[in-house]
Image (cartoon, rainbow, N blue to C red):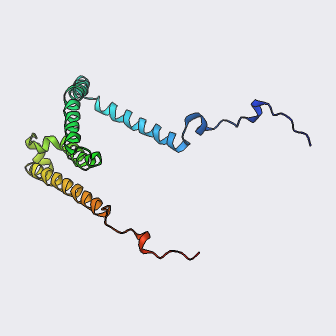
Amino acid sequence: MSTRAVPPAARRPRFSPRRAYGEGPLHLLLLAATFCLAGYAGVRLLDGDTVGVLLWFAGAAVLHDLVLLPVYAGADRALRAALGPRPALVNFVRVPVFLSGLLLLIWFPLIARRTERRYEAAAGTSPDVYFGNWLLITGALFALSALWLLFRALRSRPGRRSETKVRPSAPH
């Protein structure tokens, strides 16, 4: 039985989308659909006041990069300095702050009561309840985070016996 050397071109597999793209064809299809949806939303958004929308995007980018980013980076640095040698505790504050800030960003016109009268006519409700609801949700997020921290602390305390110590040893 003789072994022949196989030329390098014959060893290469056929064209594979995973090899060329890095992911499977379903991922590529979903990514293409996402770009189509984003393109459609952009066309619809820019249909009315194109200059106003572009100015809003530019202003939002500048506001974020020059004002908000230094503010929340400084707040995060101060939080880490206040917690000292326990950096794992930072996420128990970061997560509720992030979720509360995201809700504030999304619902700001209603929370700040900066709506027109036609909102009440269309929605059938007053925007006066949004600020109180946002505060309640923020309090609930921090309470859940504190409960989760307490649960983790009780579960990992040093005097607790693990289940492996309770089980009898296997006969050898």
Residue 88 position, x and y percent, is: 30, 48
* Residue drawn at (24%, 22%) of the image: 51
Seen in the image, is 158 located left or right of residue 126? right
**Quadrant in the rendering for residue 146:** bottom left
Pick the residue in front: 64 or 34.
Answer: 64
Residue 25 position, x and y percent, is: 55, 42
**Quadrant in the rendering for residue 104:** top left
Q: Is 70 located above or below residue 99 in the figure?
A: above
Seen in the image, is 28 located left or right of residue 127? right
Q: Is 148 located above or below residue 45 in the figure?
A: below
Quarter placement of the C terminus: bottom right
Q: Is 49 located above or below residue 137 in the figure?
A: above
* Residue drawn at (42%, 71%) of the image: 165
Residue 80 position, x and y percent, is: 23, 41
Q: How many marks?
A: 0
Pick the residue in front: 115 or 130.
Answer: 130
**Quadrant in the rendering for residue 58:** top left
Pick the residue in front: 79 or 135.
Answer: 79
Pick the residue in front: 80 or 132.
Answer: 80
Residue 127 position, x and y percent, is: 10, 48
Among all residues in the image, which is located at the extreme right? 1
Quarter placement of the N terminus: top right
